Amino acid sequence: MKQKKSELPRKPRVPRHATPLANEIRIIGGDWKRTKLAVADRPGLRPTPDRVRETLFNWLGQDLTGWRCIDVFSGTGVLGFEAASRGAKEVQLVELDTALVAQLKRTQIQLGANATQVVRGDGIVTLKQMNPASMDVIFLDPPFDSVLFEPALAAAGRAVAPDGFVYLEAPILWKDEQLKDHGLMVYRHLKAGAVHAHILKRLAPLPAA
């Protein structure tokens, strides 16, 4: 016997314009320590785990006062906001996804993060437009299944200051032989699950254009 249409269980209604939140991630140090940030449910979004970020900022030093930073594939923005929380004077958060840009701006307002600038655009193009040797820290966390690693590293090799750092998050270990054409070398490395976290430093002299 068929059920009447009115007797059939109804599917839960999902608001069309709501941005679902998959989870939250917390800032682990600095002025905004323990502050939770919303993480939008977007395909491929992969926030840097707490353990990796804790190690990263131990490597960089807990106090980033006066540093200039850029988070090139910003996503949740947690790397850039961590840097600002620890005193960075200038942090650019660059993201192409419109929904993620909107979330970054909400987080910026939530934190009162006056040292941060949210930019909607192509992170590699933005990095190429930077003055040579001008950035103290460059955060690179491209989608793992992308072909963006080589061009991002090439741009970072020119934009990072002589005593600056490039943070690279990748699905594989990048070795000095692969990095030398971009004027970079491995300074620190950590493997956590499927993530290879690297701190890179610049070789001298500055790579040719």
Image (cartoon, rainbow, N blue to C red):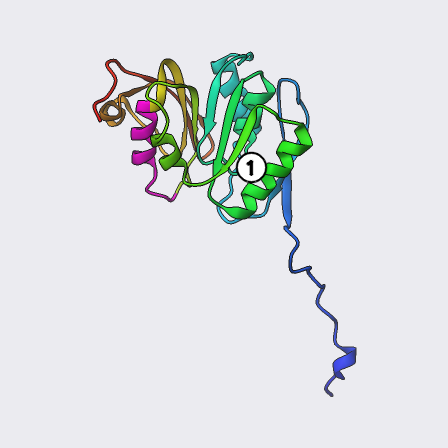
Q: How many C-alpha atoms fall within 10 Å of the one at disc 1: few (<14), some, or many (≥20)?
A: many
Q: Is residue 64 visible?
A: yes
Residue at the right extreme, as displayed: 7
Q: Quadrant of residue 134?
A: top left
Q: Secondary structure at mark 1?
A: loop
- Relative image position of residue 204 (x, y in whole percent): 25, 13
- Relative image position of residue 41 (x, y in whole percent): 58, 47
Left or right relative to 28: residue 130: left
Quadrant housing the C terminus: top left
Q: Quadrant of residue 206?
A: top left
Residue at 34% across, 26% down: 156
Q: Is residue 98 above or below residue 116?
A: below
- Relative image position of residue 146 (x, y in whole percent): 36, 43
In the image, residue 151 lies in the stretch drawn in magenta: yes
Which residue matches tag 1?
76
Nearest the eye: 134 or 190: 134
Q: Is residue 157 above or below residue 142?
A: above
Q: Quadrant of residue 4?
A: bottom right
Q: Is residue 74 above or below residue 189?
A: below
> In the rendered structure, which amino acid carries the disc numbered 1?
Thr
Quadrant housing the N terminus: bottom right
Magenta range is: 145-158
Q: Is residue 175 above or below residue 122?
A: above
In the image, residue 70 lies in the stretch drawn in magenta: no
Q: Is residue 25 visible?
A: no
* Main secondary structure type of the part rendered in magenta: helix
